C-alpha cells in the first residue's frame, strides 16, 4: 500500500456497508474535486499576485508566471491523473515540475511561498513510499529555501525567511512520518481483525460440522435404541410365528398379535422421536411402569423367565426426565443384547439405589457371556455416551461362559 493510498483511507470517511468497499467512491470523488478546487484557488491567487507584485519591466515576472503556469499545467496533465490512478511515473514527473516551480518562486518572490501549504500534502499523497515522501519533502524544502537563504546572505531579507521554510520542512516530515506510523498500526490492526474474522468463520464452520456430526450420532443412537430393536423383535416374532403356524395355529396367532403390538409401539416411538424425542414408554407413566412393561413384553417375545425387582425405586427418587431416559434405554439395550447374543435361560432386571442416592439399572443373565474388552458394540458405546451426558456411567461385567451383568447408573440429585 502506498503512502497516498493510506492517506486516502485515513482522510476519507469510512462509509462501510455490508459487502461495500472501505471508502465510498462518491466520497473519494468529492474529496478529489475539493482538492482540485484548492489547487486552482491557491495557484490562481499566486498568479494574480505574481502579475501585480513583480516588476513588469524585468524578466523575473515572466519567469515566475511561467513557473506557476507550468506547475498548474503539470497538475492538470500529471498530478491530478496520478492522484486518481496511483500512477508512479506521472506522480514523480509532476513532483519534479512542482519542485522546480517552487525553486523559481522562492528565488523570485518568497512571499508566494504560502504555496508550500499546497506542496507538502501533495508530496505525501503522491509519494510511492515513506522514503520517497521524505526525499521529495526535502527537495521541495531545499528549493524553497535556496532563494530566501541567498537573499539573507546579501542582507536583502531577515533570517526568519529561510527559517520559515525549514520549520515547514520539519513540520511536514514530522506530520508525514507520524501519520504514516499511525496508518501502519491501523493496517496491522485491520490485518489482525481480518485474521480474527477468518478464524471466527473457520470456528463457526467447525462448530456447525461438529453439530451436524453430533446430531447424526444422536439420531443413530436413537434409531438403534428404539426402532432397530423393535424391528429386530418383529423379525424374530415373525420367524417364530411362521414356524408355529403348521402345528400350533393358536400360538402363531398369538405371535402375530404380538407383532402387531410391537409394530404399533415402534410406530408410536418413531412419531415421538420426530415430535419431541421422548420415549413412548415414559409418556404419561413412571420409570417403574415403563420397566414393568419392558420386562413383560421381553418375556412374551423370548419366552425367557424375566424377573423384575423395582422395590428400591421410590416414587420420589428425584430423577430428571433425561436420567429416566438413560436408565430405560440402558435396560432396553441390555435386554436386546440378551435376545441376540446371550442364549440365556433366565434374566433379572433390578433397580438399585446407592447410599449417596444414585440410581442404577442392573440387567443380568446366565448366558454364554463374552469378553467386554474384545467386543465393543455400537449399542453399548452409544449407551455410554448417553449416560455421560447426564453425568452417569455404564459398567459391563462378563466373561465367556459366566453370563453378563450390565449396569447403568445416573448420579443423585
Image: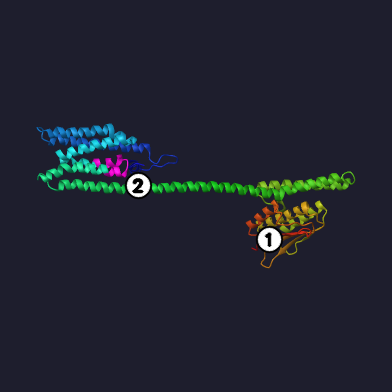
Q: Using the image as rendered, state which of residue 388 and residue 296 is in the foreground.
A: 388
Tell me the tag on residue 299: none
Q: Using the image as rendered, state which of residue 237 and residue 296 is in the foreground.
A: 237
Query: Which mark sits nearer the N-terminus, 2 or 1?
Result: 2
Q: Is the C terminus in the top left, top right, bottom left or bottom right quadrant?
A: bottom right
For image coordinates 41% across by 47% down, the residue present is: 190
Q: Quadrant of residue 408?
A: bottom right
Mark yes or no: residue 255 visible. Answer: yes
Residue 92 coordinates in the image, percent (x, y)? 28, 37
Q: Using the image as rendered, state which of residue 128 and residue 37 is in the foreground.
A: 128
- Looking at the image, residue 310 lies above or below residue 253: below
**SS label for mark 1:** strand
Dot 1 corresponds to which residue? 409
Tell me the tag on residue 183: 2
Residue 10 coordinates in the image, percent (x, y)? 34, 44
Residue 203 coordinates in the image, percent (x, y)? 52, 48
Q: Quadrant of residue 327?
A: bottom right
User: Counting other residues with Cα less than 10 Å from the Cα at mark 2, is it few (<14), some (14-19), or many (20 or more)?
Assistant: some
The part of the chain drawn in magenta is: 118-134
- Looking at the image, residue 70 lies above or below residue 409: above
Amino acid at each position: 500500500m502506498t503512502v497516498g493510498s493510506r492517506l486516502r483511507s485515513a482522510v476519507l470517511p469510512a462509509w462501510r456497508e455490508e459487502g461495500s468497499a472501505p471508502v465510498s467512491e462518491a466520497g473519494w470523488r468529492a474529496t478529489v474535486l475539493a482538492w482540485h478546487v484548492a489547487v486552482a484557488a491557491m495557484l490562481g491567487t499566486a498568479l494574480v499576485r505574481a502579475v501585480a507584485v513583480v516588476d513588469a519591466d524585468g524578466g523575473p515576472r515572466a519567469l515566475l508566471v511561467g513557473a506557476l503556469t507550468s506547475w498548474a499545467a503539470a497538475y492538470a496533465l500529471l498530478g491530478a491523473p496520478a492522484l486518481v490512478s496511483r500512477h508512479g511515473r506521472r506522480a514523480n514527473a509532476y513532483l519534479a515540475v512542482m519542485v522546480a516551480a517552487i525553486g523559481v518562486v522562492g528565488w523570485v518572490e518568497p512571499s508566494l511561498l504560502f504555496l508550500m501549504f499546497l506542496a507538502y500534502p501533495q508530496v505525501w499523497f503522491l509519494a510511492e513510499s515513506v522514503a520517497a515522501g521524505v526525499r521529495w519533502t526535502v527537495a521541495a524544502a531545499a528549493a524553497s529555501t535556496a532563494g530566501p537563504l541567498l537573499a539573507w546572505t546579501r542582507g536583502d531579507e531577515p533570517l526568519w525567511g529561510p527559517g520559515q521554510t525549514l520549520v515547514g520542512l520539519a513540520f511536514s516530515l514530522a506530520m508525514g512520518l507520524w501519520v504514516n506510523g499511525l496508518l501502519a498500526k491501523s493496517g496491522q490492526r485491520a490485518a489482525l481483525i481480518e485474521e480474527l474474522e477468518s478464524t471466527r468463520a473457520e470456528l463457526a464452520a467447525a462448530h456447525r460440522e461438529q453439530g451436524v456430526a453430533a446430531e447424526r450420532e444422536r439420531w443413530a443412537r436413537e434409531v438403534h435404541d428404539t426402532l432397530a430393536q423393535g424391528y429386530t423383535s418383529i423379525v424374530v416374532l415373525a420367524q417364530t410365528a411362521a414356524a408355529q403356524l403348521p402345528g400350533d395355529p393358536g400360538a402363531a396367532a398369538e405371535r402375530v398379535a404380538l407383532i402387531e403390538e410391537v409394530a404399533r409401539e415402534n410406530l408410536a416411538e418413531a412419531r415421538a422421536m420426530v415430535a419431541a424425542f421422548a420415549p413412548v414408554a415414559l409418556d404419561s407413566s413412571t420409570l417403574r411402569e415403563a420397566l414393568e412393561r419392558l420386562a413383560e413384553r421381553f418375556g412374551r417375545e423370548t419366552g425367557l423367565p424375566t424377573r423384575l425387582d423395582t422395590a428400591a425405586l421410590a416414587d420420589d427418587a428425584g430423577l430428571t426426565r433425561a436420567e429416566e431416559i438413560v436408565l430405560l434405554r440402558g435396560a432396553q439395550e441390555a435386554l436386546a443384547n440378551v435376545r441376540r447374543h446371550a442364549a440365556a435361560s433366565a434374566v433379572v432386571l433390578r433397580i438399585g439405589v446407592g447410599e449417596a442416592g444414585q440410581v442404577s439399572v442392573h440387567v443380568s443373565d446366565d448366558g454364554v457371556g463374552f469378553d467386554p474388552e474384545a467386543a465393543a458394540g455400537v449399542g453399548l458405546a452409544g449407551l455410554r455416551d448417553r449416560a455421560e451426558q447426564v453425568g452417569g456411567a455404564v459398567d459391563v461385567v462378563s466373561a465367556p461362559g459366566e453370563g453378563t451383568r450390565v449396569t447403568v447408573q445416573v448420579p443423585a440429585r
